[in-house]
Image (cartoon, rainbow, N blue to C red):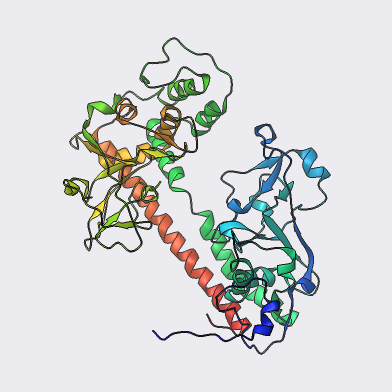
Amino acid sequence: MGLKTFIINFVELKTKDSLRLWIPFVLPKLKYKYGKINDFLTSFESGSRPKGGIREEDIGEAISLGGEQIGSDGNLNLAKIPYVSFDFFKNSKKGKVKNNDILICKDGALTGKTCLVDFSKFPSKEVMINEHIFILRGNENINQIFLYYYTTSNLFQSQIKDLAYKKKAQPGLNTNHFKKVKIPLIPKIKQNQFATQIKPIERKIKKLKAQIFKPQDIINKVFAREFNFDLEKIEKEEQRKQFFVSSSLSFRNPNLRSSVRWHKIFPIQQAMYKKINCIKKLGDYVLSTKNGWSPSCSNDDTLNLVFSVKCISKSGVINYEDLKVSDQTCSNIESYFVQNNDLFVSRGNTIDLVALASVVENLPDEKDIIFPDLFIKLNIDETKLDKKYLAYLFNSIIGRYYFKYSAKGKNQTMVKISSDELLGFFLPVPSLTLQQKMVFEIETELDIQENNKKQVILERSKIAKIINNLLSYTL
């Protein structure tokens, strides 16, 4: 690869926002002239949050969107919605969201991500943004759909990165940055034609996305159907703040605490297991457990790969997207090498992710992979308990609530489980045939979901090609 060079006149350095050794982004020559994006906006503002942040008592009132709600695919993640009070919303003079607004993350690792607001997906129309988001609302001289897709284009994103990322500290955008962002002066009639052209593609994407569900929702649905419990009733039971503590609290839960919070699992399991006659103790099926080993890792190392905690997925199958590399070795290193069909449980994580489980499939053969200290390897009696079934059960509402309340740790952002919590877990153990039937049902539905996701990506690529052709700019 040849050496890239860039020459800049010292006199021009004063025009740069920061003095860094990087090649500034240069706007490509197009058949259209450039204008300032600010000239096409009626609203360009950020929002705020009340002093003290989000309060639990505000749940269900006005929605407060932040950077974490903007997905990398342009979707709004409304799985966990932050709220502010109606009074704060009504008294706020800026940051109120309207349908079809464009939201752009203005700072942090998510800087530059954008989404288009669709109120049909919101539980409330009282929506605002916090201080980490900008609202972009076009004026009468620009088509809002075209403006949104322009913000997703490489031409726009390259300008954002040039302004926000080439400086000290974390990346970020401010109002002065946006005064420098340029947009091709494409006639509005062509913008309208673009919006019309992509409508059938958008409809197809919307239909596909309506058929995509989270892995945990699919897993929960199968278990709820087979074991005959009501997911909504279980969720309501978990949200209950007052309840009576039974003298039989420790039954099936020997590791639970004496505080009120830790008692919550008893009424949840009581409601969940009411119609199940095959509740067994996991310890009766576990032949052995083994904690992993975490060697030191470096980007320069080449010998062995090492799993990170992110490799354990909610879908129940190990992924290989966040592997590390280590040259460190030890006398019994082979005992930490991963094999196909191994079952791993995350020993430490946040309260919502601790004790996720995954089975190893399609193990790469180019390097050995080490499982780290935050993993527990479970060796179970496979004549009675299917590993995939157990992984799905751990990741379902059944396992999530048990480990949420039995995990140990003062700081709920990092809690841990041990073999005690694992072995003391009471769970449904039907016949092996029924276990495998449930595994097949879950896998079939997850495969359909993956195919739908691939179709969405394909349709989005069609829109990206159309917008790039309109901009006369090829990635």
Q: Indicate left or right for 238 with 382 as reference.
A: right
Q: Is residue 295 visible?
A: yes
Q: Give percent across and percent down for residue 60.
A: 68, 37
Residue 52 sits above or below residue 242 on the image: below
Q: Is residue 101 visible?
A: no
Q: Between residue 251 and residue 336, name the one nearer to us.
A: 336
What is the quadrant of residue 305 in the picture? bottom left
What is the tally of numbered marks visible in this picture?
A: 0
Q: Between residue 103 and residue 322, name the one nearer to us.
A: 322
Q: Between residue 184 and residue 272, name the one nearer to us.
A: 184
Q: Indicate left or right for 292 with 349 as reference.
A: left
Tell me the residue at 37%/35% (across/down). 226
* Quadrant containing the N terminus in the rendered view: bottom left
Residue 362 sits above or below residue 277 on the image: below
* Residue furthest to the top: 247
Q: Give percent across and percent down for residue 163.
A: 64, 70
Tell me the residue at 33%/31% (across/down). 418
What is the quadrant of residue 470 in the picture? bottom right
Q: Indicate left or right for 456 with 63 as reference.
A: left
Q: Between residue 17 and residue 81, name the one nearer to us.
A: 17
Residue 74 sits above or below residue 259 on the image: below
Q: Give percent across and percent down for residue 419.
A: 30, 30
Tell me the residue at 42%/29% (across/down). 408
